[in-house]
Image (cartoon, helix red, strand yellow):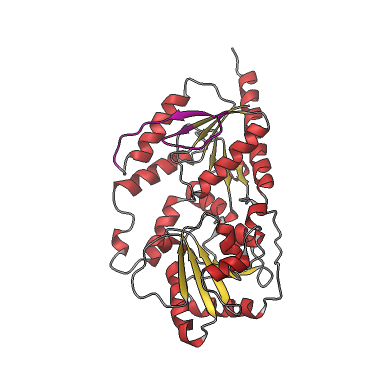
Amino acid sequence: MKLALIRRQYAATGGAELYLQRLITGLIANGHEVHLYAEHWEGIPDSVTLHRIPVKASRSLRPVRFAEIVAQRIAPVEYDVVFSLERTVSQDVYRAGDGVHKVWLDQRRRYATWWRRPFVGLGAFHSNMMALEKRTFSPHLTRHLIVNSEMVRQEILREFAYPTERIHLVRNGVDTTRIQSGDRLKTRERFGLREGDFTLLFVGSGWERKGLLFLIKLMQRLEKTDPQIRLLVVGKGKLRGTVPSNVIFTGPMPKVEDAYAAADLLTFLPIYEPSSNVVPEALAAGLPVITSRFNGAAEWLTEGVNGHVLEAPEDIDALEKAVRFWQQAQSIRPITCAYPLDLETNVRETLRVLELVAAEKKQDRLSTPI
């Protein structure tokens, strides 16, 4: 197949970009011709044709201008499938890895301080994003959708009434071999963790959305009552207020597998996350997970078997109760998961959708009168 893939920017730690890199590797291995449309991208294989899309616009207009220019560039070229990981207007398949912008704004408003709530979602950027998203989710423009959680599927059905039979659930996959290769002893020694410390782990940037503040509140409560519970925070961001002594900030870790090896429990409480990669990564490393119901990856968890799902991420009492459960249940290692965690399954299921669309387009061409 001759394929066009769309993603605006490369970010070394971006989940969508890592997903696209894995997919490109799989496509090339299967002999497909791959074209990538992006503003900026580094490190792609030589066999991929990169089409740079120059965009000069303000932040509020940049996504719209990118979508318009890509549509112009793609229109004269005949591709078997155009697959976009951005909100664009020229794709056959859109992967809704960023979820639904309106739902994200609703969640931000819900968890904002009272004086900030009236201002959440105001401005041209958000209105432009929602208008662009409405076009992206139009069944007249986009043949099929890929979602990475049932949560996002239901949001799309609720907000856009897209045909359910054209939405395909393809769960995230991770590099299980890499994730399982971390060094527990050296990493715990590096960060001053004692043998008896029960170590929680948070991985991610964008700390407001991903709920680090809720974990900090728990650690403030536990600082004096249970000093053996520690929290490793991997990533970067900003926090206000005093941080308790039982919290260790590592900064970004290129070898994040060491963080999983050092920890005993992943604690990740987002107010909105379509399907966080850190959940299957933790599960692949053998760690149980505590997350919120606003994370599509909560669907990976079975209560008391491999984790807990909190109805309200701000419920510190429920969070402490779940942490205590796993502190007492350390013999349940490694934990199990009902879904496959590997990259190969993810790539294979994505390819199946792309091949389905390529066959549909071919049939449309054959049935169109000359």
Residue located 45% across and 41% down the image: 87
Decide: is 28 above or below 343.
above
Could you say where residue 336 lies in the image, as x and y percent from the top left?
71, 64
Residue located 39% across and 29% down the image: 69
The verdict on residue 20 being magenta is no
The verdict on residue 39 being magenta is yes
Q: For residue 128, which quarter of the picture?
A: top left
* Magenta segment, prevailing SS (helix, strand or loop): loop
Residue located 43% across and 78% down the image: 245
Q: Is residue 243 left or right of residue 114?
A: right
Residue most extreme to the bottom: 225
Q: Quadrant of the C terminus?
A: top right
Decide: is 329 above or below 159.
below
Could you say where residue 209 lies in the image, as x and y percent from the top left?
43, 61
Q: Is residue 37 left or right of residue 290?
A: left
Q: Is residue 241 left or right of residue 100?
A: left
Is residue 310 among what the camera can see?
no
Q: Nearer the viewer, residue 54 or 243?
A: 243
Is residue 217 among what the camera can see?
yes
Decide: is 278 above or below 201.
above
Q: For residue 72, which quarter of the picture?
A: top left
Q: What range of the chain is rendered magenta?
A: 37-58
Q: Quadrant of the N terminus?
A: top right
Could you say where residue 191 lies in the image, as x and y percent from the top left?
51, 70
Label tally: 0
Could you say where residue 331 lies in the image, as x and y percent from the top left?
71, 76
